Amino acid sequence: MKKLLLLTVISLLCCTKGLCQRDTVNFTVDFSEAHRNRFRVQMHLSVPNGEKLLDLNIPVWTPGYYQVLEFGRNISEFRASDLRGNGLPWQRTRDDQWRIATGGGGRIHVSYTVTTERPFVAVPYIDKDRAFIRPTGIFMYPDKDLDRTVIVEIMEHPSWRNIATGLDSIAPRTFRAGDYDILYDSPILAGNLTELPSFRVRGAEHRFLGYQMAQFDRKSFMDDLQRIVRSASDIIGEIPYEHYTFLGLGMGNGGIEQLNSTAVAFTGDGLDSDPANRLRTLSFLAHEYFHHYNVKRIRPIELGPFDYSRPNRTRGLWLSEGLTVYYENIILKDAGLIEPGQILEDWQNTIQGYENNAGRKKQTLAQSSWETWEDGPFGRRGETISYYEKGPIIGMFLDIAIRHSSKNERSLNDVMRALYYNYYKEKDRGATEEEIKTACEGIAGRDLDDIFTYIQGTGDLDYQKYLSMAGIQYQRTVNADGKSSVKLSIQPTLSILQKEILGDIFGY
């Protein structure tokens, strides 16, 4: 009770300092039960006069990871009271919703506990050594009221010195989000973190803080990362944030992109001794970084504003994820971090993997996006496909076709810029399927039905048609075991246009 009173006083002091307004929601996150893998959360918010019932929800998924995560099952010890400490009646109406009888309005206080189970990039986790706040699993929102400003205060932990996040800091251990969408897109990592040398690109500071980092040449690594950021930002022509933070979560798998940060499994182990591991790591970071353009800003229209109470389906993850995979090697090539032979080998492996998946005859690329909530991001091999595999192939076809039809004066980069400036910046929304196709065809100067048919159908892909435009010979043989073997090679004679496309895409 003494701790609850202290946290209430702290939140009230925040209000007196101008950090709390009528439409502001204030959270305090307490790490005192870290040893029990639990967060203690305090929430203060106002209820409009006359509103007798208030529904508080917790999201059921997190943007960037298209799976239902059932965050509500980890919440317990829910309490609601007015500011005088009088308890307010409440009931749990859904697994993700709590209904409070507010008494007719005023400012109320809510507290609850979040129990965590495992360290993973898509969910919150806390133990005696660090805390990872995945906001969708920690912070409740007033039902259908996501526009409120949110203030988050992190209580001091006696033995942790660092807090890393993309949120703007407004006071020590206190952060502000302009609305819930920004809050849910801004994870927080706390603990004894290692900070790597920061750098600036286009005036914006870029930081990298991580948990349990190995020993490696940190300056060399950050120099490479700076080249990646510069290469990626050159594609669009601007950086849409003031600061960016890479959060290294330690050992594990995966990463999730955010507006001005990314949370990734990372230790740095083997970066100096294993060139292949270093290249994989840089490619992984290039992917997550480029997402702040492609999916956070350039996006299918269904991906925002979000409904956090249910799956948000789209047929457009071939654009958001597939084209981001395509751009990994483009970014690394322009940054001088990958050899042309490696790019061709990567494509050879990607195409061979796709051709050896029987699921390519059973599911379209659009369906793989729509059904990812059931199939998972990589699909069910043999039964379905993955937009991570077919999507970049379509991206390559589009880029080659646009370059070929425009005599290499335009490219897929022009499409990405058009979607960024016309829809994100001017219209403040995503683009429809038809608008994406129209943008591609407008840049190409011709219809692209031949390629867009591949998104909606399960027919065989004509690799030679497109690869030959870039001076690449495609060969496919079927082995005795029925598996395809794919070989890509440079044609012996090339036209000037083929040489230009080959160099711009594949680095030769």
Image: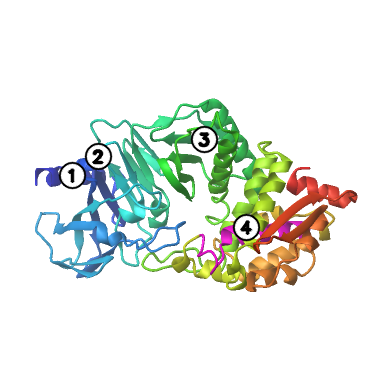
Q: Which residues are magenta?
A: 378-402
Q: Amino acid at mark 4?
A: Gly
Q: Which residue is mark 4?
A: 353
Task: Locate residue 320, reporting x and y percent.
Answer: 57, 59
Q: Amino acid at mark 1?
A: Leu
For the point 51% across and 67% down, the residue is: 302
Q: Quadrant of residue 224?
A: top right
The residues bearing labels 1 and 4 have C-alpha atoms spaced at a distance of 55 Å
Q: Which residue is mark 3?
A: 205
Q: Amino acid at mark 2?
A: Met
CB under 8 Å between discs 2 and 1: yes
Q: Earlier in the sequence, mark 3 or mark 4?
A: 3
Task: Locate residue 468, reporting x and y percent.
Answer: 82, 57
* Mark 2: secondary structure: loop
Q: Which residue is mark 1?
A: 7
Measured along the vertical axis of the image, is residue 33 above or below residue 313? above
